[in-house]
Image (tube, helix red, strand yellow):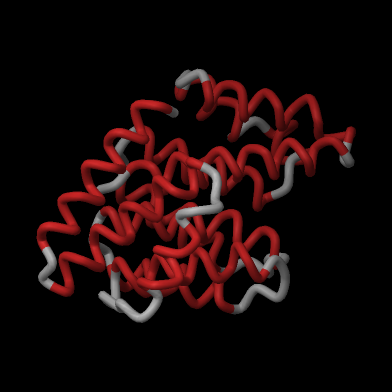
Amino acid sequence: MKPIFYIILFVLFVLYLIFEVYFRRRTQKNTYKLINSLQQGDLKTFNKLVNDPAIKKTVSAYTRLSLTFNAAIAENHIEAADKVFDEIASLNLTSEQKLSFFGNALNYYIGLKNKPKAKICYDKVKSARRNEAQKDYLMTIYEVMVEDQTSKKKLIEQRLNHEANEQKLADYYLLEHIYQVEGDLYKAKECSQLAQKLAKQL
């Protein structure tokens, strides 16, 4: 599993939550408690807090479940993560929530080679009606890593020249996979080496 996708998307997910909390001061204190306990790796405290009645009353089901999903991943509880995933998939989410959660989950399930769950993520992302750039980026990850599509190779190669290093790192991994599919092992290895070198700089 390439961890960089999960790391980037988890950071974006947390930033989104912080943005949401800023405009909902009523839930700020309890939401930060959950986020901080998870970020600090204090899963015992997190699991206690997330089941607290006061937390349930003030923190949305989406936020609680999304963080619980990440906690299950951190504990390597695959079945628990799957259960929470199914709960979130049944919710009526905004486009921003779809991109945030299912983008995160997409990379997790790609790493596990769980194609059915990855396909659900892809469909949910595809149904989002905002932020076309992020939507297209996430869909490309699925199309390359799961469907072995190579049609966007030139697009990915071209954007390497003008994108941030975090995005560039992820694209090196995508290109590595594309070249492997095409049988160009030399270029695949080159992308892998460039990714490793860039990762050390971040």
Which residue is pictured at 51% across the width and 58% down the height? 103
Which residue is pictured at 85% across the width and 35% down the height? 22
x, y percent for residue 102: 52, 60
x, y percent for residue 29: 78, 25
Classify residue 202 by image quadrant. Answer: top left
x, y percent for residue 177: 24, 62
Which of 172/125 is in front? 172
Q: Is residue 71 left or right of residue 191?
A: right
Which of 186/92 is in front? 186
Which of 81/196 is in front? 196
Which of 1/81 is in front? 1
x, y percent for residue 191: 25, 51
Which residue is pictured at 51% across the width and 18% down the height? 40
Which residue is pictured at 11% across the width and 57% down the height? 186
Classify residue 175 by image quadrant. Answer: bottom left
| Circle count | 0
Q: Is residue 139 left or right of residue 186?
A: right
